[in-house]
Amino acid sequence: MARRFTLEGAKVRAVIEIQKESRGLVRNVVQCLEDFDIPLYFSHTISHIHGKDRVEKVFRGKSE
């Protein structure tokens, strides 16, 4: 979805993953994130989302 959002004109700042590692194919991470310079944060969660009509700021936190 990060790649699709980027191709549609959205600014994707990062992908947040609660798991410790990817269970998907490495090529998908490369094609969908690395090729678009989108960072991937493992072992993280979203703690707060700010914005009324659009997402303006997201806070991430390290999961246990």
Image (cartoon, rainbow, N blue to C red):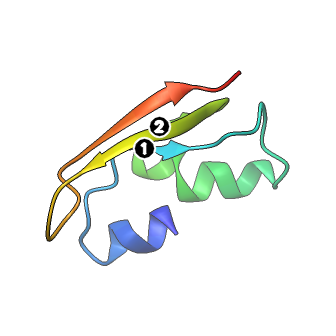
Residue 27 occupies quadrant: bottom right
Q: Nearer the viewer, residue 3 or 59?
A: 59
Point out the tag, 2 or 1, that comes first from the N-terminus.
Answer: 1
Amino acid type of the residue tagged 1 in the rendering: Ala
- Residue 24 rendering spot, x and y as whole percentages: 81, 54
Residue 36 drawn at (x, y percent): 42, 52
Indicate which disc residue 41 carries: none
Residue at 47% of width from left, 37% of height from top?
Answer: 39
* Labels 2 and 1 touching (C-beta < 8 A): yes
- Residue at position x 77%, y 30% from top? 20
| Badge 2 element | loop
Q: Residues within 10 Å of mark 2 (few under 14, many from 20)?
A: some
Q: Which residue is mark 2?
A: 39
Q: Residue at x 50, y 47 (%)?
A: 15
Mark 2 residue type? Pro
* Side of 9 relative to 60 (left or right): left
Q: Is residue 22 above or below residue 42?
A: below
Residue with the mark numbered 1: 14
